[in-house]
């Protein structure tokens, strides 16, 4: 079975559509969404509609949480805060209701999904170091955890000693707990502007991090035209 695992779309419809087209060409069986469907980009409502239409298990990200009024905006920097306020005005009542229905964590038979960290998911901590990963290993009762939030794709392994890899092909040994950050569809921050998502192939026992070209200029122009902070448009072309 093949799962497409994706998140941090951030209202970037050009990027999301490119990823979904790539998924169609790869015969994906199921979709899993790691949250932050909205925030920063110019098409939040359309992105919510796309993800809803997939019927994918999904978790709530900190931006999704903020636009439904569940997150203190003081935790956001000024550009993010501006984007949250703008996005709130763009979403239909139906989209807001659906975002409100999203849990912070989803447990499926062999893996779990969370936006930031299993360790106090409502705080949206980042998992960027082995120490951060260790907090998650201790909370995991399934071998695999998929998460996002940092927009930086990588994987951590609960080996002795613990290790990590930046390699896009991640072999899985289900006797070793593994945390995988699937990167970001709509605002990559690893200096690679291409969209990033993961394919979990259960038969091949591996996760592959996939990069997809999309129309960065079109997404950036829409951000500028919407009157959102110009830096949110500029960062897309450098992947920062
Ligand atoms: Zn994000």
Image (cartoon, grey):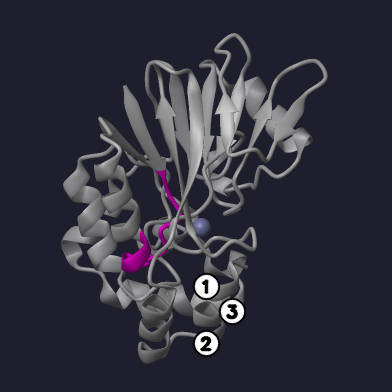
Q: Is mark 2 within 8 Å of ligand 1?
A: no
3 or 1: tag closer to the N-terminus: 3
Image: 8 above or below 177: below
Whether label 1 touches label 2, CB < 8 Å: no
The residue to which callout 3 is attached is 78
What's drawn in magenta, residue-wise?
6-15
Which-is-in-front pick, marks 3 and 1?
1
Rendered image quadrant of residue 176: top right
Up-down: is 164 above or below 16?
Answer: above
Q: Quadrant of the C terminus?
A: bottom right
Closer to the chain start, of discs 3 and 2, is 3
Crowding at dot 1, Cα within 10 Å, few <14 / some 14-19 / many 20+, comes out as many
* Residue underneath mark 1: 236
Q: Is residue 72 above or below residue 196?
A: below
Q: Secondary structure at mark 1?
A: helix
74 vs 220, nearest the viewer: 220
Mark identifier at residue 230 = 2
Extreme front residue here? 25
Q: Nearer the viewer, residue 232 or 218?
A: 218
Disc 1, ligand 1: is the CB inside 8 Å? no
Secondary structure at badge 3 equals helix
Numbered disc 2: secondary structure? helix
In this view, the residue in front, 139 or 173, is 173
Residue 214, label in figure: none
Q: Is residue 183 depicted above or below 167 in this figure?
A: below
Furthest residue to the top? 175
Residue 203 location (% of width, % of height): 39, 15
| Residue at image coords 60%, 64% | 75
Tell whether position 7 is magenta. yes
| Residue 165 appears left or right of 149 | right
Query: How far across and how far down the image is residue 145, in percent?
Result: 52, 28
């Amino acid at each position: 079975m093949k799962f497409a695992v994706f998140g941090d779309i951030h209202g970037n419809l050009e990027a999301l559509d490119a990823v979904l087209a790539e998924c169609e060409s790869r015969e994906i069986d199921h979709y899993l969404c790691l949250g932050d469907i909205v925030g920063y980009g110019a098409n939040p409502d359309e992105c919510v509609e796309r993800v809803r239409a997939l019927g994918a298990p999904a978790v709530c990200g900190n931006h999704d949480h903020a636009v439904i009024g569940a997150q203190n905006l003081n935790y956001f920097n000024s550009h993010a805060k501006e984007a949250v306020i703008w996005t709130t005005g763009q979403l239909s009542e139906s989209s807001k209701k659906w975002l409100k229905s999203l849990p912070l964590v989803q447990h499926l038979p062999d893996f779990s999904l969370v936006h930031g960290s299993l360790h106090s998911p409502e705080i949206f901590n980042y998992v960027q170091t082995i120490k951060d990963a260790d907090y998650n290993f201790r909370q995991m009762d399934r071998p695999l955890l998929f998460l996002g939030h940092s927009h930086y794709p990588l994987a951590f392994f609960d080996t002795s000693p613990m290790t990590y890899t930046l390699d896009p092909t991640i072999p899985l040994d289900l006797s070793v707990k593994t945390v995988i950050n699937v990167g970001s569809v709509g605002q990559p921050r690893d200096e690679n502007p291409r969209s990033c998502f993961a394919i979990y192939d259960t038969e091949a026992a591996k996760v592959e991090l996939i990069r997809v070209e999309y129309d960065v200029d079109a997404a950036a122009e829409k951000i500028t035209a919407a009157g959102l902070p110009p830096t949110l448009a500029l960062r897309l072309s450098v992947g920062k």
